[in-house]
Image (cartoon, rainbow, N blue to C red):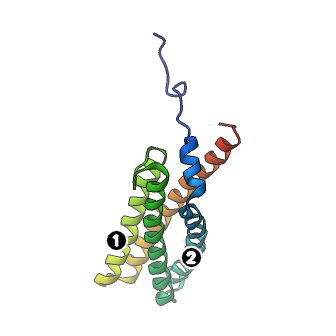
Amino acid sequence: MASETLTQAPSRQLYTPEERARRDATIWTTVQGVLAPVQFLVFLVSVALVLRFMWTGNGYDAATVSIVLKTAILLTIMVTGAIWEKVVFGQYLFAPAFFWEDVFSFAVIALHLTYVWALLDGWPHDQQMWIALAAYAAYVVNAGQFLWKLRMARLEAEGRT
């Protein structure tokens, strides 16, 4: 028996033909396609407001509202994404095709909710903002994971993987 390396092992396609058909037919694909860029736009505004507060000490309330809004959108996209996974893959979370993205999404959620806890518990404003920035850094990594999967899905659809 020949020895195989990880690079030689057969790779699973991101979607089976049936999964691709379900993905293309469900409204939840459109919902995710709308929520993801909305979340990114809120993130861009929010990170600017947070950095403004960190640099100048001004605009705490605006930064806080933006972080809470970003957190609400994140939770919404996670719930609707779980529904999307159920429709496409037959399970709410941790489908093999998106396992690591889901794992990291929970870290992102944990950091965002840690911020909310710090806010409600009255932590010092600068500590709250550092938590928000950590949450945002994790979000950027997670968004990158999903963008990579989107690219892989397009290449797969074109028959180039």
Q: Quadrant of the C terminus?
A: top right
Residue drawn 53% across and 63% down?
28
Q: Nearer the viewer, residue 132 or 41?
A: 41
Q: Picture coordinates of residue 11 (x, y %)?
A: 53, 32
Mark 1 is on which residue type?
Answer: Thr
Does 39 appear above or below 87?
A: below
Q: Picture coordinates of residue 118 (x, y %)?
A: 33, 78
Is residue 51 something one can see in this rendering? yes
Q: Picture coordinates of residue 50 (x, y %)?
A: 51, 79
Q: Is residue 38 left or right of residue 85?
A: right
Gap between marks 2 and 1 measured at Cα: 19 Å
Callout 1: helix, strand or loop? Answer: helix
The outermost residue toward the top is: 1
Residue drawn 47% across and 52% down?
101
Q: Earlier in the sequence, mark 2 or mark 1?
A: 2
Mark 2 is on which residue type?
Answer: Val
The mark tally for this picture is 2
Q: Is residue 71 left or right of residue 117?
A: right
Q: Picture coordinates of residue 137 (x, y %)?
A: 49, 63
Does 105 appear above or below 97?
A: below
Residue drawn 44% across and 80% down?
68
The outermost residue toward the left is: 121
Neighbourhood count class around disc 2 (C-alpha, 10 Å): few under 14, some 14–19, many 20 upward: some
Q: Quadrant of the N terminus?
A: top left
Disc 1 target residue: 114
Is residue 134 something one can see in this rendering? no
* Quarter assignment of residue 106: bottom left
Q: Nearer the viewer, residue 28 or 34?
A: 28
